Image: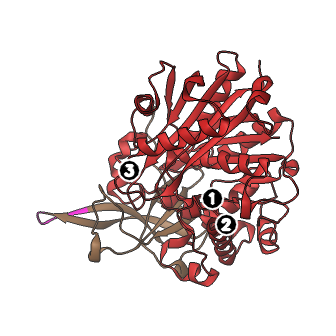
Chain colours: A brown, B red
């Protein structure tokens, strides 16, 4: 096994939206505080495809083959500490 | 090696039954299947049971009769019933037993399945991040398929509309109220392009099938239905399947393709020979995609076939004549035996208002579930 740094940019291979709050153990806001988010399968170079959240959740602004880049987004906060997670944003 | 025949089928309606346990529903399904075969429980030489919510389906012998038979529990998520069917058929095929029963039973709470991701070998971050939802995968797969093969959202609505109309003809279905295509399209978007009514509901129910050595079947019935093939496959490297965080760049086809191909080869039957089809319609997109994956049409042909009514009860390739999962919901362990129940009723000419015309002779049933497991069963008169 060797470590391999993956490219931060990639191509959107497949995508959908999450229109309802996931059940436990989802850490993000639920109930009336829930906000829909995008989810995609992103191909990083010619190395691998990874599944991740998308910063964009409007189907009109998402397209197959679009370029996306890794970013970090706030997911929730615990006792005042912000918890972040990874996501891909359109370039 | 012996050929195998189905001589009895039984079902407990699919729906919501407050105060009734999955085991009690399983007892009703077993009782109906045994009676349909014209035998008694004591004639059953072995059993196979599948369930998600009941850890030990074999405990059901305490409710139907402590006859001491071997009873094996199986579980392969949504493909559980294919494994139960195969284990039961193989026990007879190999000559160990003459008569056996496969039973499936489950009782799920409302809403999308949520479980500890560790149960399927997934890391906890996957769920904490909001990605551990089977419906998300189905949305992605359907979205991509529609995009690549020119299938419209309207076609997804037509699939739901058809299955709910078929469900209205099925007294055992959960959903028996037809719905207009526009209302289906206008219902809340859960996972684009799939709206609320394009998904099946986890629910409750049970089904059972009694099998015997084919050369003994005439003792019990004048309408035996033969088990021609049961094949189960898991995903190959390259398949992007439900409950996976990554996929390789080089793609391979889904496990349904391999399971269906193997089943058709084993049975010596072509997809064009099939008269009644049951496909895993976890969502409307899945029915469309599985038509091609199972070999019934080329990718993209579904748009025209469905518009022309080919998958209707009176069409050239009737799909989910009892309403499928969309109308029946999905009690996981029972779902695939519900499929066989419907095919047997159709091949015997006992399907009443939803009978496929022209004396159907060959039936096909497909299951697909997490984490990329598919089953394909072929039955014939």
SS type, badge 3:
loop
Which numbered disc flags the more N-terminal residue, 3 or 1? 3
- Does residue A69 sit above or below B85 in this rendering? below
Viewer-proximal residue among B8 and B316 = B8
Which numbered disc flags the more N-terminal residue, 2 or 1? 2
Disc 2 target residue: B166
Q: Quadrant of residue A84?
A: bottom left
Q: Mark 2 lies on which chain?
A: B
Disc 1 target residue: B324
Q: Residue furthest left?
A: A79
SS type, badge 1:
helix
SS type, badge 2:
helix
Q: State whether discs 2 and 1 lie on one chain.
A: yes
B219 to the left or right of B159: right
Q: At x 54% / y 75%, what residue is drawn?
A: A62
Magenta stretch bounds: A79-83
Viewer-proximal residue among B89 and B28 = B28
Q: Residue furthest top?
A: B96
Q: At x 65% / y 40%, what residue is drawn?
A: B36
Which numbered disc flags the more N-terminal residue, 3 or 2? 3
- Does residue B232 sit above or below A27 in this rendering? above
Q: Could you say which disc has been placed on residue B20 in the image?
A: 3
Q: At x 33% / y 60%, what residue is drawn?
A: A23
Q: How far apart are marks 3 and 1 (CA)?
A: 23 Å
Q: Mark 1 lies on which chain?
A: B
């Amino acid at each position: 096994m060797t470590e391999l740094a993956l490219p931060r940019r990639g191509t959107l291979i497949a995508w959908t939206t999450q229109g309802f709050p996931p059940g436990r153990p989802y850490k993000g806001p639920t109930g009336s505080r829930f906000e829909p988010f995008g989810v995609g399968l992103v191909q990083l170079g010619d190395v691998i495809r990874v599944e991740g959240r998308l910063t964009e959740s409007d189907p009109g602004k998402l397209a197959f083959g679009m370029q996306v880049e890794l970013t970090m987004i706030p997911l929730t906060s615990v006792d005042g500490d912000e918890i972040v997670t990874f996501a891909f944003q359109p370039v | 090696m012996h050929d195998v025949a189905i001589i009895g089928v039984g079902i407990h309606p699919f729906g919501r039954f407050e105060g009734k346990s999955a085991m009690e529903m399983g007892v009703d399904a077993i009782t109906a299947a045994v009676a349909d075969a014209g035998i008694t429980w004591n004639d059953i030489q072995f059993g196979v049971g599948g369930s998600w919510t009941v850890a030990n389906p074999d405990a059901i012998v305490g409710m139907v009769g402590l006859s001491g038979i071997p009873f094996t529990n199986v579980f392969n998520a949504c493909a559980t019933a294919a494994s139960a069917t195969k284990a039961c058929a193989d026990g007879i095929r190999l000559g160990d037993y003459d008569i056996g029963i496969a039973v499936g039973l489950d009782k799920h709470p409302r809403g999308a399945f949520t479980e500890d991701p560790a149960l399927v070998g997934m890391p906890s971050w996957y769920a904490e991040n909001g990605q551990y939802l089977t419906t998300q995968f189905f949305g992605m797969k359907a979205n991509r398929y529609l995009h690549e093969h020119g299938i419209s959202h309207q076609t997804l609505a037509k699939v739901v509309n058809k299955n709910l109309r078929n469900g209205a003809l099925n007294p055992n279905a959960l959903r028996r109220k037809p719905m207009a295509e526009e209302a289906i399209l206008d219902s809340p978007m859960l996972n684009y392009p799939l709206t609320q009514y394009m998904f099946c509901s986890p629910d409750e129910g049970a089904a059972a099938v009694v099998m015997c050595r084919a050369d003994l079947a005439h003792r019990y019935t004048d309408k035996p239905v033969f088990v021609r093939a049961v094949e189960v496959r898991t995903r190959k490297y390259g398949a992007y399947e439900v409950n996976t965080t990554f996929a390789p760049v080089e793609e391979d086809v889904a496990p349904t393709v391999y399971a269906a191909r193997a089943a058709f080869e084993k049975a010596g039957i072509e997809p064009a020979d099939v008269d009644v089809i049951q496909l895993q319609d976890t969502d409307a997109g899945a029915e469309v995609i599985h038509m091609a994956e199972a070999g019934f049409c080329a990718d993209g042909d579904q748009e025209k076939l469905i518009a022309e009514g080919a998958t209707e009860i009176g069409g050239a390739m009737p799909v989910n004549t009892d309403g499928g999962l969309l109308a029946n919901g999905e009690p996981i362990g029972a779902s695939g035996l519900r499929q066989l129940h419907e095919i047997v009723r159709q091949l015997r000419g006992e399907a009443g208002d939803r009978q496929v015309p022209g004396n159907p002779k060959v039936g096909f049933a497909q299951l697909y579930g997490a984490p990329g497991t598919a089953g394909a069963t072929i039955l014939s008169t």
